[in-house]
Image (tube, rainbow, N blue to C red):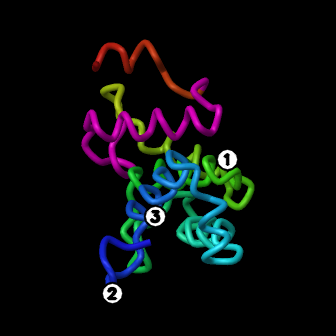
Amino acid sequence: MSAAPGHDAHMLCTVSGVQILVLVDGFEELEARVPAGKEKIAKFIAGLQDPATGTFFGDQYGEPDTRFLYGALNGLSLLGRLDLVDVPRAVTCIESCANPDGGYGNSPGAELHSGQIFTCLAALSIAARLDTVDTEHLAGWL
């Protein structure tokens, strides 16, 4: 999904669309209008994972960011298709973004940011891997 007609598809717009479909119970209508639409959306999201690092890109142009990793796991979990991606590799990617100060950045070695901490913790929660978080260290930063 994209921000407007004629624009390129993007992870964030797609995940927002999935969330709206969930809120309005719209998957049946989607399937009526676009056969296998749910699966096409899931495959689009899954196709944005970098198999080498486990992170996700926002679009075909390849900007990696933990925001997109969270968005991917969010959207795929709502679609019931986390099986399409390498979740353990995504978790390893998040772990590599942990900062010595206790938070998370948007990529390995990047400055930590409260928004990135949210996306990393939310992604770990969806992956059922909050056990990887150094909660004492993180709480000290927060």
Question: Nearer the N terminus, badge 3 or badge 2?
Answer: 2
Categorize mark 3 by other alpha carbons within 10 Å: few (<14), some (14-19), many (20+). many
Task: Report helix, strand or loop for mark 1.
Answer: helix
Residue at 31% across, 71% down: 3
Residue at 68% across, 56% down: 86
**Label for residue 14?**
3
Horizontal relation, residue 30 to residue 135: left or right: right
Q: Hey, what amino acid is under mark 3?
A: Thr
Instruction: Judge whether residue 128 is colored magenta.
Output: yes
Determine the CA span between mark 3 and mark 2.
Answer: 15 Å
Q: Which residue is mark 2?
A: 6
Horizontal relation, residue 70 to residue 27: left or right: left
Determine the CA span between mark 1 and mark 3.
Answer: 23 Å
**Label for residue 88?**
1
Q: Give the camera-side residue of 57 and 76.
A: 76
Task: Report helix, strand or loop for mark 2.
Answer: loop
